[in-house]
């Protein structure tokens, strides 16, 4: 109780003692440093090119934990360590062949995460096209049994927010194979989750229900989805599938954590982070190497500017967001066991594009107060064209909701995000250095303001 009272009094005093002019000057310093001496882009480039895709449970993922730990150690933070966590392991295998039986033409396809393979065999079957999981249920076993179910509902281009378009279509990727199997389907093909018409299939997690048979699930490119639909409109189509994907036993991996201890309220933690794992077919540059680079740049900037935080600033690079949330769950579990309190947790997991603002979530008992407090910063952030709105925080920080702090999601422009999301072209070449640096500066500025004033 006394600590909370001191925090409140100190926040009131800091509003007048520091003044908006001083704060504006410091935020300008944050931007100046990040845009001239930032390390986020070279560090991200190094990780993408030297390690590549970082599927949780893989050697690449564990190599990445060593890579980012070394970078954080170079900043002379108060604490840097790896936190063990158990994660699922899955291998794609070397063979992924999807083609038309009639003419042997190949489709651009890639297995969905956690899919099984065809067991060394070539699976051949007629294709049936559907627009939804409910349509499979309505057609029933009579129409579905023995068929390859082709889910071809596109993301809705009328949605101005592409994450809303993604959310409206992704259920067929996650559950398509298990619903197909429930009614006797032998495999699932899913239109890739993107608004763009291209030849790059998008992977992503899928899920099975143990009570039903497991059948392969693969994504095909949007160009091939259009072609397959056209062929089906002209008559029956047979497809052959061969892939080697398999699920392996769980493995140990790590979150990577670095922090600067608070000088006044060390027990109030402000977390900034992203997820270190990515899918294996690209370099995970936007998803979510960019978020990790953002978080590490925050620590680099604060140290370079010789900033002494009042509250503990903690950088957390989470493992296994893509197919299990093992790192986020373990981090929250350990934090709760230690009796820690996260005043705020900010996650960057929407790419390295031009920053637009922040969205916020939290426990209903505290959210209104915290969100109102955060909104006082809009005026000082307005020269940088940043908004503060209600909305989601982030998957990895969501298990911290029980601590009743504020959960914040960094929101860059989303229009190009799903061009690259979960694809082989999510590479460093797709990341614009200035946009990445602007995002890091925006995040650092908000972390600084929360640290100065509390919530």
Image (cartoon, rainbow, N blue to C red):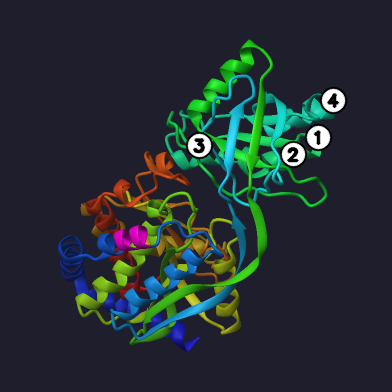
For the C terminus, the quadrant is bottom left
The residue that disc 1 covers is 183
Horizontal placement of 7 versus 106: left or right?
left
Look at 47% across and 79% down and name the residue there: 82
Q: Is residue 244 above or below residue 24?
A: above
Circle 2/circle 1 CB separation < 8 Å: yes
- Give the image quarter of residue 308: bottom left
Circle 1/circle 4 CB separation < 8 Å: no
Horizontal placement of 114 versus 288: left or right?
right
Circle 2/circle 4 CB separation < 8 Å: no
- Give the image quarter of residue 420: top left
Look at 48% across and 70% down and name the residue there: 62
Find numbered disc 3 in the image and state the secondary structure of the residue it sits on.
helix
Label 2 – label 4 distance at C-alpha = 14 Å
- Label 2 or label 3, whichever lies nearer to me, is 2
Q: Which residues are magenta?
A: 44-50
Q: Nearer the viewer, residue 200 or 38?
A: 200
Find numbered disc 4 in the image and state the secondary structure of the residue it sits on.
helix
């Amino acid at each position: 109780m006394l600590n909370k009272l001191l925090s409140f009094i100190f926040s009131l005093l800091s509003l007048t003692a520091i003044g908006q002019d001083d704060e504006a000057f410091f935020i300008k310093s944050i931007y100046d440093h990040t845009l001239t001496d930032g390390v986020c882009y070279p560090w991200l480039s190094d990780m993408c090119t030297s390690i590549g895709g970082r599927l949780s449970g893989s050697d690449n993922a564990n190599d990445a934990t060593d890579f980012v730990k070394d970078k954080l150690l170079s900043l002379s933070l108060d604490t840097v360590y790896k936190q063990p966590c158990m994660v699922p392991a899955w291998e794609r295998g070397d063979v992924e062949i999807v083609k038309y039986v009639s003419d042997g033409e190949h489709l651009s396809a890639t297995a969905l995460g956690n899919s099984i393979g065809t067991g060394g065999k070539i699976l051949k079957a007629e294709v049936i096209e559907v627009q939804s999981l409910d349509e499979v249920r309505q057609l029933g076993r009579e129409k579905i049994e023995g068929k390859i179910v082709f889910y071809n509902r596109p993301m809705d281009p009328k949605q101005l927010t592409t994450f809303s378009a993604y959310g409206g279509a992704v259920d067929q990727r996650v559950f398509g194979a298990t619903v197909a199997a429930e009614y006797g389907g032998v495999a699932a093909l899913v239109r890739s989750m993107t608004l763009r018409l291209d030849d790059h299939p998008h992977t992503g997690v899928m899920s099975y229900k143990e009570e039903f048979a497991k059948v392969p699930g693969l994504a095909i490119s949007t160009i091939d989805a259009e072609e397959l639909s056209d062929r089906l409109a002209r008559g029956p189509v047979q497809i052959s599938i061969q892939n080697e994907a398999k699920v392996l036993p769980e493995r140990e991996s790590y979150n990577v954590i670095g922090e600067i201890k608070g000088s006044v309220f060390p027990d109030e933690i402000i977390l900034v982070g992203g997820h270190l794992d990515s899918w294996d077919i690209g370099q995970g540059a936007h998803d979510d190497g960019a978020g990790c680079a953002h978080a590490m740049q925050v620590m680099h900037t604060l140290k370079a500017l010789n900033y002494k935080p009042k509250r503990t600033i903690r950088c957390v690079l989470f493992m296994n967001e893509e197919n299990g949330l093992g790192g986020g769950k373990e981090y929250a579990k350990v934090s709760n066991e230690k009796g820690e309190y996260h005043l705020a947790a900010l996650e960057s997991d929407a790419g390295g594009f031009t920053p637009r603002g922040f969205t916020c979530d939290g426990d209903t008992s505290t959210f209104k107060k915290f969100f109102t407090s955060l909104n006082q910063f809009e005026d000082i952030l307005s020269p940088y064209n940043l908004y503060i709105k209600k909305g989601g925080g982030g998957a990895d920080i969501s298990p911290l909701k029980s601590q009743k702090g504020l959960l914040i999601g960094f929101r860059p422009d989303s229009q190009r995000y799903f061009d690259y999301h979960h694809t082989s072209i999510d590479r460093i070449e797709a990341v614009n250095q200035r946009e990445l640096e602007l995002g890091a500066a925006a995040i650092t500025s908000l972390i600084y303001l929360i640290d100065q004033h509390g919530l």
